[in-house]
Image (spheres, rainbow, N blue to C red):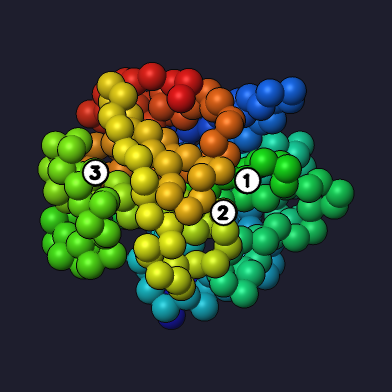
């Protein structure tokens, strides 16, 4: 197994990553989240190893395959960039992202900053959102894949099947979208996907231009915003009464991943 060492960091190639903010408008206060989106492969990510804390580098070197290493770096580099932008702590090797008991990310050595981070990665794409503890967020990205359709059908309720029929989209797309919605909510709940999927049933799903808005039967305090990313689908779950400006995130997705249509930005 090849062991990597930390050298001087270099920037990712132009066009492979984007950073920005998401405004979260509540009735009396506005919160801000920061995101980082990366589209890259392991060879181009290796120069980012100096961003890792020694504990993260040890974990990285013990991963058994290049695919696992790539996924880990996509998530960690995106997360560290987002956290640094939100907190102003730009010595990214000084803090690290540990695992909770259900594998949710836990930021350590970050001082008095009360922030959390949500991470998702699939294929060559990694995305992370850093946000204040006061305002939960969850995000998930998945590939639109017909080969997983039969497995996804087993975790969808009859009501959800009728919702998907109503939006008249390709089955792999619509089923994958529903999975990302549930996965993103589970990240807020910090339970992992270790419960009856009927408990996080989607109650309402509607299309608004090029995005999809949904809510939950048993978690009515949350809603989801879903949007296509070429061969992938991404869902963001947030409190129902928050108005989120995701325009910068949508622009970043279009810059990094070709073939994305624009859409409304203030659901």
Residue 161 visible here: yes
Please give left or right for residue 113 compared with residue 174 in the image: right
Q: How far from the left and from the top, in percent, is residue 4?
A: 53, 68
> First in sequence: mark 1 or mark 2?
1
Q: How far from the left and from the top, in percent, is residue 229?
A: 30, 37
Dot label at residue 188: 2
Marks 2 and 3, how far apart at CA? 23 Å
Of residues 223 and 123, which is closer to you in this image? 223
> Given the current orientation, which residue lies at the most extreme right position?
112
Tag 1 and tag 2, C-beta contact below 8 Å: yes
Q: For the point 30% across and 32% down, which residue is it?
A: 206
Please give left or right for residue 136 compared with residue 109 in the image: left
Q: For the point 33% across and 55% down, which residue is it?
A: 179
Q: Secondary structure at mark 3?
A: helix
Of residues 253 and 262, which is closer to you in this image? 262
Q: How far from the left and from the top, in percent, is residue 168?
A: 14, 37
Residue ID for mark 1: 136
Residue ID for mark 3: 163
> First in sequence: mark 2 or mark 3?
3
Please give left or right for residue 233 compared with residue 252 in the image: left
């Amino acid at each position: 197994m090849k062991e990597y060492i930390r050298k001087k960091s270099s920037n990712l190639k132009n066009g492979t990553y984007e950073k920005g903010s998401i405004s979260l408008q509540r009735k009396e206060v506005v919160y801000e989240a920061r995101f980082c989106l990366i589209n890259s492969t392991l060879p181009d990510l290796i120069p980012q190893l100096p961003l890792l804390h020694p504990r993260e580098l040890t974990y990285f070197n013990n991963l058994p395959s290049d695919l696992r290493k790539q996924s880990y770096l996509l998530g960690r580099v995106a997360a560290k960039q987002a956290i640094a932008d939100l907190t102003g702590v730009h010595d990214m090797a000084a803090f690290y992202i540990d695992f909770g008991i259900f594998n949710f990310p836990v930021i350590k050595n970050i001082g008095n900053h009360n922030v959390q981070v949500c991470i998702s990665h699939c294929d060559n794409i990694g995305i992370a959102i850093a946000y204040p503890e006061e305002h939960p967020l969850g995000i998930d990205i998945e590939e639109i894949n017909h080969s997983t359709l039969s497995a996804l059908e087993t975790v969808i309720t009859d009501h959800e099947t009728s919702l998907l029929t109503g939006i008249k989209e390709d089955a792999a797309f619509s089923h994958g979208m529903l999975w990302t919605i549930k996965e993103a909510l589970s990240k807020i709940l910090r339970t992992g996907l270790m419960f009856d999927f009927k408990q996080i049933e989607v109650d309402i799903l509607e299309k608004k231009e090029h995005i999809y808005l949904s809510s939950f039967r048993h978690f009515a305090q949350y809603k989801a915003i879903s949007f296509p990313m070429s061969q992938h689908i991404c869902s963001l779950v947030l409190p129902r009464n928050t108005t989120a400006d995701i325009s910068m995130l949508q622009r970043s997705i279009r810059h990094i991943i070709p073939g994305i249509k624009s859409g409304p930005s203030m659901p």
